Image: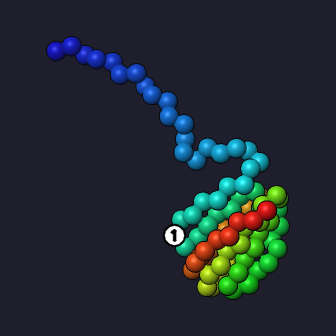
Amino acid sequence: MKKVKLKEKIVPQSCDYYFGKPRIEMNGSECLVDGLQSIVEYSNDKITLSLGSQIITFFGDDLHINSFTREGAVVEGNIISMEFSS
């Protein structure tokens, strides 16, 4: 039987993103937001974050920011919708 060598295919990582650009990643009842510049509004049913030239607003119930760093935040709760504006 003849052995066949397979060439290794290089596939870019799905999580690659442009450095310095905002990134949003949803996972169940939480949303990771990278590229955060400031928190504009914070309440139980509405959280508004500034991403520089863009604004993202989360609407829902029992919303809170679970973790917060200079670069990003994790919004958790019953996220019903998100609104993007500039």
What secondary structure is marked by label 1? Answer: loop
Circle 1 Cα neighbour tier, 10 Å, few/some/many (<14 / 14–19 / ≥20): few
Q: Residue furthest left?
A: 1
Is 39 displayed left or right of 7 in the figure? right
Quarter location, residue 57? bottom right
- Quarter containing the C terminus: bottom right
On the image, which quarter does residue 6 sit in? top left
Under mark 1, the amino acid is Gly
Count the marks: 1
Describe the colour scheme in one phrase: rainbow
Which of the 4 image quadrants contains residue 68? Answer: bottom right
Residue bearing the label numbered 1: 28
Describe residue 59's horizontal placement relative to residue 52 as left or right: left
Q: Position of residue 1 (x, y in %)?
A: 16, 15
Closer to the camera in the image, 44 or 3? 44
Q: Residue at x 75, y 73 (%)?
A: 48
> Height in image: 48 above or below 14?
below
At 77% from the left edge and 48% from the top edge, which residue is drawn?
20
Is residue 33 visible to us here? Answer: yes
Identity of the residue furthest to the top in this view: 2
Residue 52: x and y in percent read: 82, 59
Residue appearing at x 79%, y 78% in the figure: 41
| Residue 66 seen in the current view | no
Q: Residue furthest front?
A: 85
At x 74%, y 50%, the residue is 21
User: In the displayed structure, would residue 20 be above or below residue 5?
Assistant: below
- Residue 19 x/y as whole percent: 73, 44
* Residue 12 drawn at (x, y percent): 54, 37
